[in-house]
Image (spheres, grey):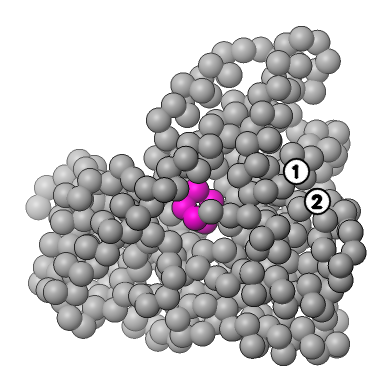
Amino acid sequence: MSFMPPRFYLDYNAGAPLRAGVLTCMQEVNSLPGNASSVHSFGRRARRYVDDAREIIAHSVGAEPAGVFFTGSGSEANALILHDKQNFFCSTIEHASVLAQQETSATAGIERAERLIAVLPSGVVDCAALSAMLTTPSIRPQVVSVMAANNETGTLQPIKMVAELCHRHGVVLHCDATQAMGRIPIAMDEWGVDFLTMSAHKLGGAQGIGALVCNSSSGVDGSIIPSSSLVRPLLLGGGQEGGMRAGTESVAAISGFGFALKSACEDLARMPEVQRLRDEFESRVIAHLSDVRIVGRGVPRLANTSCLIHPSISAEIMLMRCDLEGVAISAGSACSSGKINPSHVLHAMGYNDASCRNAVRVSIGLDTPPQALEVLAELFTRD
């Protein structure tokens, strides 16, 4: 079979296509001279673009602009809040950037397993397990980190309940909302989130720009605690981003970030269209392959995400089959340098190695044509 040129991109969770207008916005900004830290008129104009985007991002999650700090990625934003914490809990299904920070933050006398929050077979964080961990004084964490939506399965987490548990015990909550931003409404105060991270390219902005958002107060034990006082910079040497990240801001990427997020929030009302397309695809696959497993089906998921376990074909073979036909899907997270490794997320949910090797992820958007999923369903169910 000859190679088919790319036709259908079904890997939005790895990086969504640029939204309409984002490139034009970035090109216009990039054509203008000026460093956002300069005091002359060119610099002030650049600063205005940065501040406008900061306001859009803050407004989208119910925070204050002063609490938004731009980073080079969602992974860097996670590291910015977590890198110096000597003891923090996170779930077993977190993004690798969170798990890596947790692995290196070992506390004397506390095993790492004692700081990992289990998930139920559905992929939802076990709040009963977290409650028990928080009531053990010897391992009381400084921060708990739980993602809003899993990048591989799309499973939504009970963040509001997690926040209530954390605050009851005087613990700060960080939430990686990288996959959730622009796909579900997010309100930091309503959820009870103290720190939130996001990345532009997951919602149709440019690659290479993310943000950490600090709530105006943590609300821990009813007190007013400046959240930013818990953040220490990773990069030193300049006063950019309120002293939280040295280095000249990428004004064009930041402006595009704001543009993309505003557009994504305006499109939230259309997400049921995406879910209908996803559900029709899953039903079509089940009708032709009854023993396929759809991970997280039956619990709340992102409308755009489907993780399927084929009964007999490995993810590697399925990805090659689809790629030859010009269809792009993935085998889970896109953060492993192109390697197809058994998913730590599925392992945490209780799936065995064989199932993990056969799992693929399909993630779509508003621009995905129904024909793309019809073609994928045929490829997935082909003998």
Secondary structure mostly taken by the magenta-highlighted segment of the chain = loop
* Left or right: 320 in relation to 355: left
The answer to which quarter of the image holds residue 167 is bottom right
| Closer to us: 292 or 353 | 292
Mark 1 residue type: Glu
Marks 2 and 1, the one that precedes in the sequence? 1
In this rendering, the answer to whether 192 lies above or below 256 is below
* Left or right: 317 in relation to 297: left
Q: Does the magenta run of residues contain 151?
A: no
Label 1 Cα neighbours within 10 Å, binned few <14 / some 14-19 / many ≥20: some
What stretch of residues is rendered in magenta?
Answer: 179-184
Tag 2–tag 1 contact (CB < 8 Å):
yes
The answer to which quarter of the image holds residue 195 is bottom right
| Closer to us: 33 or 186 | 186
Residue that appears at 80% across and 18% down = 38
| Closer to us: 178 or 191 | 191
Residue that appears at 43% across and 62% down = 302
Give coordinates of residue 304: x percent, y percent. 37, 57
Residue 364 visible in the picture: no
Give coordinates of residue 118: x percent, y percent. 59, 83
Q: Which residue is mark 2?
A: 216
Residue that appears at 20% across and 69% down = 283
